[in-house]
Amino acid sequence: MLTLASKLKRDDAVKSGHSNSAVTDSARRVSIRDRLLVKGNLRLKLLLLFLLPDTCKVNFPDVNKLHHFQLDVTPDEGYYQSGKFQFEVEVPEAYNMAPPKVKCLTRIWHPNITETGEICLSLLREHSIDCTGWAPTRTLKDVVWGLNSLFTDLLNFDDPLNIEAAEHHLRDKDDFRCKVQDFIKQYAR
């Protein structure tokens, strides 16, 4: 598998005239996604340091794969306060025309996240009826903000993905809070 770093090294070698003739055009091409990610990576890191909430932290498990990263969200208010929730973000080859694929790796009791990690967040939808879905003008910063907001202002009990959690909240808010805290103690520390 070719990594972005090796593609960029080959491009530099070709530009400086140190390449052999065996290097083909396809080997020298870098996808639009990879170019956008390299350009956006520094910007994302700076935004995470200065403009995003203190409750978010981004990790790149493999620095050569900028299209795959993990986001840790540690809410400082609400039902999910004191939990640490990890998300896996995979940026598709068709980025920025297609949204990133996101999965919650931490088991959670949440109306908009299933226990298996599926997420209901409109900006992650490629096609949305209400026009709030993904658009090429959206960025990874928007995704990070959206995931963070799932624990505060975007917490939605009226349009749930996890219907059981939403109904639990409607029936008994105190018991819902207790179950959320149990999940945090077991899975989100």
Image (cartoon, rainbow, N blue to C red):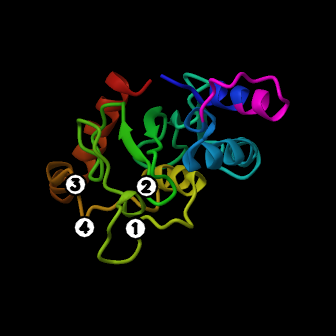
19 on left or right of 145: right
State the residue position of label 1. Answer: 133
> Label 4, on which residue?
158
Check the picture and name the quadrant holding the C terminus. Answer: top left
Q: Position of residue 186 (x, y in %)?
A: 32, 22
Q: Earlier in the sequence, mark 4 or mark 2?
A: 2
Q: Magenta stretch: residue 170 in it?
A: no
**Region rendered in magenta:** 11-24
- Magenta highlight: main SS: loop
Q: Quadrant of residue 18?
A: top right
Of the residues tagged 2 and 1, which is closer to the observer? 2
Q: Mark 4 to mark 2: distance in Å?
A: 24 Å
Which residue type carries mark 3?
Leu
Mark nearer the viewer, 3 or 2 = 2
Q: Amino acid at mark 2?
A: Pro
Extreme right residue here?
16
* Residue located beneath label 3 in the image: 161
Quadrant for residue 102, please give it.
Answer: top left
Total label count?
4
Q: Earlier in the sequence, mark 3 or mark 2?
A: 2
Query: Which residue sits at x=29%, y=30%?
Result: 182
Q: For this rendering, which residue is in front, 73 or 3? A: 3
Q: Secondary structure at mark 2?
A: loop
Label 4, residues with CA under 10 Å away: few <14, some 14-19, many ≥20: few
Q: Residue at x 32, y 62 (%)?
A: 156
The amino acid marked with disc number 1 is: Gly
